[in-house]
Amino acid sequence: MNVVRLLVLGAMREKGALHGYAIRQVLEDWQVQMWTRLHSGSVYHSLQQMAKEGLISSQGHEPGHRGPGKALFSLTPSGEEEFLNLLRGALSSFDLVELSAGLALLDCLPEEGSALLADTASRLAENADRLMKLAAMAPPETGAPRTRDLLVLWSENLRATAGSLQKILAKH
Amino acid sequence: MNVVRLLVLGAMREKGALHGYAIRQVLEDWQVQMWTRLHSGSVYHSLQQMAKEGLISSQGHEPGHRGPGKALFSLTPSGEEEFLNLLRGALSSFDLVELSAGLALLDCLPEEGSALLADTASRLAENADRLMKLAAMAPPETGAPRTRDLLVLWSENLRATAGSLQKILAKH
DNA sequence: TGCGGACTAGCCAAATTTGGCTAATTCGCG
DNA sequence: CGCGAATTAGCCAAATTTGGCTAGTCCGCA
């Protein structure tokens, strides 16, 4: 699941044709640095790759305001489709960064997105239960790798994520 | 903060001279797949790099049991130092995978490790509070990037992590 | 005996990330 | 006016990750 691609496509989906630097600014405005690191090189690399794959197309060049000219890109129909698929993946993920990217873009898939998120919340809760049961069965331990502590840590973390998602869904 | 390096060095620290495949087996026994993905290529790559950097040294070649021969490596003194530094970094991290790697190896740094973990828990709790305050101040929103929801999600997640760490510390 | 499957041991090429960097243009101050 | 700083716009080489793959050896079954 590629978070950079999802975010770049999402910014373009929301704002229309954009150049690299503007995408970076949109993502900065969205405060993605709160939940992930995004390096400028990754944005440009993904733009190049996605252009090569036909997910986005070049919309020519415009003069810049204070700097060099801008190379504009916009979503193609297959890019739109790829965006929606990436979003579905993100909304189904247990990885908090991926989930955050999915949540940021949830409104691009309103009904389906909420259903996916509800399913994810429920799976997270089940998994939290499963891990907590494993923790209860794990022997007391000395030394690496502290399996029981890790099971507790992850179970409580998944539990918290599930709870937050349910709260978010209930509010909307 | 390089989790692969920490885990490879940690396995060697715990078990002595090992070859690549054995490191992979140790890490599998430790169930690291529960909290991160570790590709075999990453293990071998980090072995090569760390050998080049003098963090580990080659201990020759032995015959394999049922397969090809094994290329053994062991920790050098500077590798030991690097291991401890990586472990300190992991125990201070807000990233759950890094923290998990740190926790798995906590007993290699008993007093200092627990102190670091206590500090991390306290910083996590402060940050959770800070994010929750930001969430309370954020305007209701429609469309990307759902900043308030994300602030809640992360705040509750950091809060859960802090709580789990405190629980783990209280138990030991 | 021979062959397929399992286990042992490691490698590889491509993709992606990282942590800066370069370059163009404008602005503001001495 | 000139120069350094700031902003705009993007690039680059190295490091790391990914998702398999190859190859050697043994085991078990027909």
Image: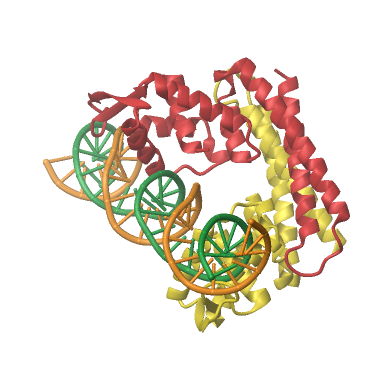
Chain colours: A yellow, B red, C orange, D green
| Residue A24 in sight in this render | yes
Query: In the displayed structure, would residue B118 be above or below residue B31?
Result: above
Q: Position of residue D29 (x, y in %)?
A: 29, 41
Splitting the image into 4 quarters, where does residue B77 fall? top left
Query: In the displayed structure, would residue A53 be above or below residue B151?
Result: below
| Residue A93 in sight in this render | no
Query: In the displayed structure, would residue A103 be above or below residue B153?
Result: below
Q: Who's the residue at 61% across and 28% down the image?
A: B103
Q: Position of residue A2 (x, y in %)?
A: 54, 60
Q: Position of residue B170 (x, y in %)?
A: 75, 20
In screen coordinates, is A16 left or right of A72?
Answer: right
Single out the residue that lies furthest toward the top.
Answer: B111
Q: Count the labels in the image.
A: 0
Quadrant location, the C terminus of chain A? bottom right
Quadrant location, the N terminus of chain A? bottom right
In screen coordinates, is A129 left or right of C24?
Answer: right
Q: Nearer the viewer, residue A96 or D16?
A: D16
Q: Who's the residue at 49% across and 81% down the image?
A: A58
Q: Who's the residue at 67% across and 26% down the image?
A: B117
Q: Nearer the viewer, residue A162 or A97?
A: A97
Query: In the displayed structure, would residue C14 be above or below residue B39?
Result: below
Splitting the image into 4 quarters, where does residue B66 fall? top left
